[in-house]
Image: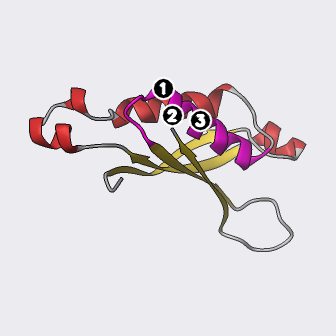
Amino acid sequence: MSNVIRMKNAAFYAYHGAFEDEQNLGGKFEFDVDLYCDLSAAAESDSLAKTVDYEKVYAFIRQTVLQKKYYLLEALANTIGKGLITEFNALQRVVVRVRKPHPPVKGVIDYVEVEISQER
C-alpha cells in the first residue's frame, strides 16, 4: 500500500530506561510514526471521518508513553505499534520510531533510535 500519513518528532518527557537514574530523573523521548492505510475515500470526500485522525493517534501515543515506565525502547515502540493497529481499524501497517536523545553511554552520541513495524 502506497498511502501513508507520517507524524514526525512528537516529543514527551518520560521515565523510561534500563538504569535507575533514567527511571527516576526522566528524559526527552521523540517519536515518528508512519500510518499506512487507504486514503482514497478521504481524498475524494475531504472528510475526516474517512481517514485516520492524527490528533487521536497523537493522544494515544502520549497516553502510552506517559502511563507506564519501560526499561527498553523496543518494548515501548512495540506497545505503541500493536496498540495503534488495534485501536485504529483503517491502519494496515504502522512503523514506529522511538528516539532517546543523548543516551547514557560512555561517549558522545546524538541519539539511539529503535524502529518497529506492525501489520494487521
Q: Is residue 43 above or below residue 115?
A: above
| Count of marks, rendered view | 3
Crowd class of label 1 (few under 14; some 14 to 19; many from 20; radius 10 Å): few
- Which residue is drawn at the image coordinates 50% and 29% (left, top)? 60
Q: Pointer 2 and pointer 3: residues touching (CB < 8 Å)? A: yes
69 vs 55, left or right, is: right
> For mark 2, what is the residue?
84
- x and y percent of residue 2 in the render? 33, 56
> For mark 3, what is the residue?
82
Q: Amino acid at mark 3?
A: Lys
Crowd class of label 3 (few under 14; some 14 to 19; many from 20; radius 10 Å): some
- Which residue is drawn at the image coordinates 64% and 44% (left, top)? 77
> For mark 1, what is the residue?
87
66 vs 22, left or right, is: left
Q: Is residue 109 above or below residue 22?
A: below
* Towards the viewer: 6 or 16: 6
Label 2 sits on a secondary structure element that is helix
Q: Pointer 1 and pointer 2: residues touching (CB < 8 Å)? A: yes
Q: Amino acid at mark 1?
A: Glu
| Magenta residues, start to end | 72-92
**Residue 79 within the segment the image draws in magenta:** yes
- x and y percent of residue 11 in the render? 53, 46
Q: Earlier in the sequence, mark 1 or mark 3?
A: 3
